Image (cartoon, rainbow, N blue to C red):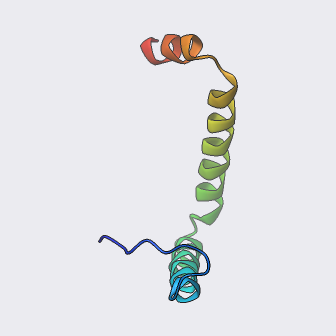
Amino acid sequence: MLRKEYKPGTPGYDAHVKGISAEVVRGLRRLDAEGKLAEAGERVAQAINDLREERILTPRELNRRAII
């Protein structure tokens, strides 16, 4: 589903953000009901750490890791 792109200060931006927030809350509640919320949190934390690490690495190091 493609969404219209909203920018802060444009008409409909607040409703758009609230809609996204509501979707996130529904997703978190579903994961919690399924008992998978902690696991999902761990995956998100790992992904953030991976991104931080990749930003520190040089392009050469990233290429080497991709090959391995």
Residue 22 vs residue 58, the one in the foreground = 58
Of residue 53 and residue 26, the one placed in the foreground of this image is 53
Q: Residue at x 61, y 75 (%)?
A: 8
Q: Is residue 53 left or right of residue 17?
A: right
- Corner quadrant of residue 33: bottom right
User: Outermost residue toward the left?
Assistant: 1
Instruction: Say if 42 sits above or below 36 in the image.
Output: above
**Horizontal and vertical percent for residue 10?**
54, 82
Up/down of 54 relative to 19, above or below? above
> Residue 42: x and y, percent?
65, 51
Q: Split into 4 quadrants, where in the image is the N terminus?
A: bottom left
Depth check, front residue: 33 or 3: 3
Q: Quadrant of residue 7?
A: bottom right
Q: Which residue corresponds to the image point at 36% horizontal and 73% vertical from the top-left?
A: 3
Image position of 31 (left or right of 55): left
Q: Residue at x 43, y 12 (%)?
A: 67
Where does residue 47 sit, x and y in percent of width and height?
60, 43
Given residues 33 and 43, the one toward you in this image is 43
**Which residue is depicted at the point 31% across and 70% down?**
2
* Picture coordinates of residue 35, whole percent (x, y): 58, 68
